[in-house]
Amino acid sequence: VAATDSADDLAWFSNAGRQSVDLGAPGENIYSTWPGGTYQYSSGTSMAAPQVAGAAALVKAAFPSATGIGIKAQLLDSVDPAASLAELTTTGGRLNAAGAVSCSGTPKLWLDSPTGDFDAEVGTPLAIRAMAARCGASGGIDISATANGTAVALTPRGDGLYTGTYTPSVAGALTISVTGSAGSGSTTRTATGIASGVYAIAPGGPPVTITTHANDENARLRFEGEAGKRISLKLSSVTISSPLGWSSSRSACHTGRSREQPQ
């Protein structure tokens, strides 16, 4: 939980992380209990986190059949968007307790994994994890998922958690989309990232040609080696293009040590 101030800005002392901090909550100049039976104004994420815990208790009181996953879905899918949190938390928003205890019958849905700007690998399964609830409960919801438009099967755990995997077969942009439907209402969450190509190389072997297919795509080269041995990698005929149409070609040589645990 990140701490916000009275203007919904991220507090100067707060932790943040687009893949590690879920949401913000008021955490600056909070009037709270203090040792010795007194009260005092305090600031910190120690003030923000209890507000989320309190909102979770309100959700459970409003919806007694709510599961732990259902409560989390209610909290994350009801935040108020905040510009200061947009790139610094997974939800990009600040806690809204009133929204969390509201129920229109439309599913609350959150795509827990992958998060935005993810970097998957071609040939390696990408974990998909979604949480869905209807008034905090896990029943009565139809869940579907796609990867670049291709259907992906998700397995329900029974408490509102749905998991599955998708293995990219080609490099390039990749969008994971999950939709929860109940009655006439539906909610969709998406995460857009990159599937990077993985290339096998052999020291002293034939050259390998690599072509990237999207902006920010990585090209990963793997080889069998011995820990601590120095290696030299030569790049030739490298062409770098831009959307403006210019391009440049160059050659380079990089020398370094192989990883302590080589692949």
Image (cartoon, helix red, strand yellow):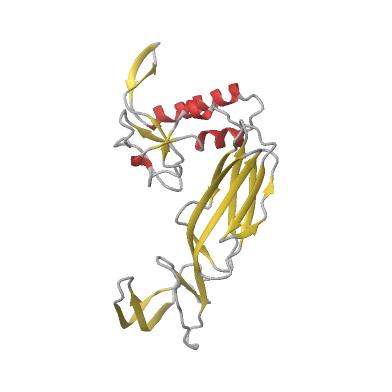
User: Residue 191 versus residue 113: which sits nearer the camera?
Assistant: 191
- Residue 103 place in picture, x, y as percent: 58, 29
- Residue 85 place in picture, x, y as percent: 37, 41
Q: Is residue 91 above or below residue 175?
A: above
Residue at 55% x, 71% y: name it. Answer: 170
In which quadrant of the rendered image does the N terminus lie? top left
Q: Is residue 150 above or below residue 143?
A: below
Question: Please, which residue is most extreme toward the front here?
Answer: 184
Question: Please, which residue is most extreme toward the top here?
Answer: 37
Left or right of 206? Residue 169 is right
Q: Total label count?
A: 0
Left or right of 158? Residue 127 is left
- Residue 228 place in picture, x, y as percent: 44, 73
Residue at 34% x, 33% y: name it. Answer: 8
Left or right of 90? Residue 28 is left
- Residue 131 place in picture, x, y as percent: 59, 42
Left or right of 65? Residue 82 is left
Residue at 50% x, 53% y: name it. Answer: 191
Residue at 43% x, 68% y: name it. Answer: 214
User: Residue 185 versus residue 97: which sits nearer the camera?
Assistant: 185
User: Residue 111 versus residue 11: which sits nearer the camera?
Assistant: 111
